Image (cartoon, rainbow, N blue to C red):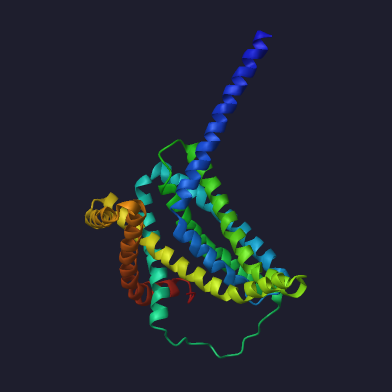
């Protein structure tokens, strides 16, 4: 009996350790994922366009296929690469993170540039067969998964940089939990956004009360503005997070001036409004990071347009 009690005590101890480890993994995953907010919002803002033009009944299956492709991108390809970097080349994480930050700045600045200076798009007016819907769907899903791979690489690198030093299995578990959690959050949100107008239409046509019908019509009418707001928020988040990554990366590499200047200005602003010191400090820091990110993105636009773009097109046979 004493042996059985001792065994049960050991099992209880192991269970407590396992529970603590699970809590640590979840906490680290949530904390690290928060740093990837810009890329996550961008991912959620980009995906809905891939279901435009399809029948309503195909929207959720398409989103589900893209989400499954995103899971495979993160867990099968990017997770092993991230663990190898952490184990054998941790010095590469910061430069890769800064490269991803520069890409976020470029993408955000390009969207702002196109709004401020709209240009005439060149269209190919030649007639092209549309093909069958199944082929079009396959093409759209494949394109979405490729785009997701780039965004997922940014997200996984940001998450990896936010994980405290720990053992191999803790890093692997944290990355896996964060990857799955972010994918579910992003594509779950996309599914809700995409089907919101259908839900509103259902309420407007089938609601028994006038209030319900009015709510449905309001949802349908508001969705274009919601999508526009999501695009604006996604662009701002990209620029802010990209600038923040660059500032912190430069600080880690030894150039402290941008980080110290932003930190000093944020402290001055926070002391001016002591009642909301924390909030003011965060707003000023994010705004200055965003200004720097926007400036960097604008500088990258001609480099990407006239140098990187043509080289990429030459290597991959004209694919933009």
Q: Is residue 160 left or right of residue 134?
A: left
Q: Is residue 246 above or below residue 82?
A: below
Q: Is residue 31 left or right of residue 19?
A: left
Quarter of the view holding residue 62: bottom right
At which x and y percent is residue 226?
A: 55, 71
Return the residue nearer the eye: 107 or 269: 269
Query: Which residue: 66% across, 68% down?
Result: 195
Q: Could one spot residue 172 in this view of the protein?
A: no
Q: Could one spot residue 33 in this view of the protein?
A: yes
Q: Is residue 199 above or below residue 170?
A: below
At which x and y percent is residue 74?
A: 54, 53
Q: Count all numbered tags in the image, as a single digit.
A: 0
At which x and y percent is residue 245?
A: 36, 56
Return the residue nearer the eye: 195 or 220: 220
Query: Which residue: 68% across, 65% down?
Result: 60
Where the N terminus falls, by quadrant? top right
Quarter of the view holding residue 8: top right
Query: Which residue: 57% across, 22% down?
Result: 13
Return the residue nearer the eye: 15 or 130: 15
At which x and y percent is residue 162?
A: 41, 47
Q: Is residue 125 left or right of residue 109?
A: right
Query: Which residue: 27% across, 52% down?
Result: 251
């Amino acid at each position: 009996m004493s042996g059985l009690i001792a065994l049960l005590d050991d099992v209880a101890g192991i269970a407590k350790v396992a529970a603590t480890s699970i809590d640590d993994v979840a906490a680290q995953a949530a904390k690290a994922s928060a740093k990837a907010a810009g890329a996550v919002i961008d991912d959620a803002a980009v995906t809905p366009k891939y279901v435009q033009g399809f029948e309503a009944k195909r929207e959720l299956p398409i989103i589900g296929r893209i989400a499954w492709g995103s899971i495979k991108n993160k867990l099968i390809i990017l997770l092993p690469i991230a663990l190898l970097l952490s184990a054998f080349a941790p010095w590469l994480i910061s430069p890769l993170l800064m490269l991803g930050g520069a890409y976020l700045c470029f993408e955000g600045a390009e969207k702002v540039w196109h709004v401020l200076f709209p240009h005439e798009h060149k269209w190919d007016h030649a007639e092209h067969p549309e093909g069958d819907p199944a082929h079009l769907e396959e093409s759209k899903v494949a394109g979405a998964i490729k785009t997701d791979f780039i965004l997922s690489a940014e997200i996984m690198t940001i998450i990896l940089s936010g994980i405290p030093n720990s053992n191999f299995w803790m890093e692997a578990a944290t990355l896996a939990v964060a990857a799955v959690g972010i994918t579910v959050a992003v594509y779950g949100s996309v599914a809700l956004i995409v089907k919101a107008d259908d839900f509103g239409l259902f309420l407007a046509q089938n609601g028994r009360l006038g209030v319900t019908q009015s709510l449905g019509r309001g949802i349908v009418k508001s969705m274009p503005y919601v999508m526009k707001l999501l695009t604006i928020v996604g662009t701002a988040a990209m620029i802010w997070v990209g600038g923040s990554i660059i500032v912190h990366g430069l600080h880690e590499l030894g150039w402290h001036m941008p980080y110290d200047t932003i930190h000093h200005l944020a402290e001055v602003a926070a002391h001016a409004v002591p009642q909301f010191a924390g909030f003011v400090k965060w707003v000023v820091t994010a705004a200055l990071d965003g200004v720097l990110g926007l400036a960097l993105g604008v500088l990258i636009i001609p480099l990407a347009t006239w140098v990187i773009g043509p080289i990429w097109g030459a290597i991959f046979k004209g694919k933009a």
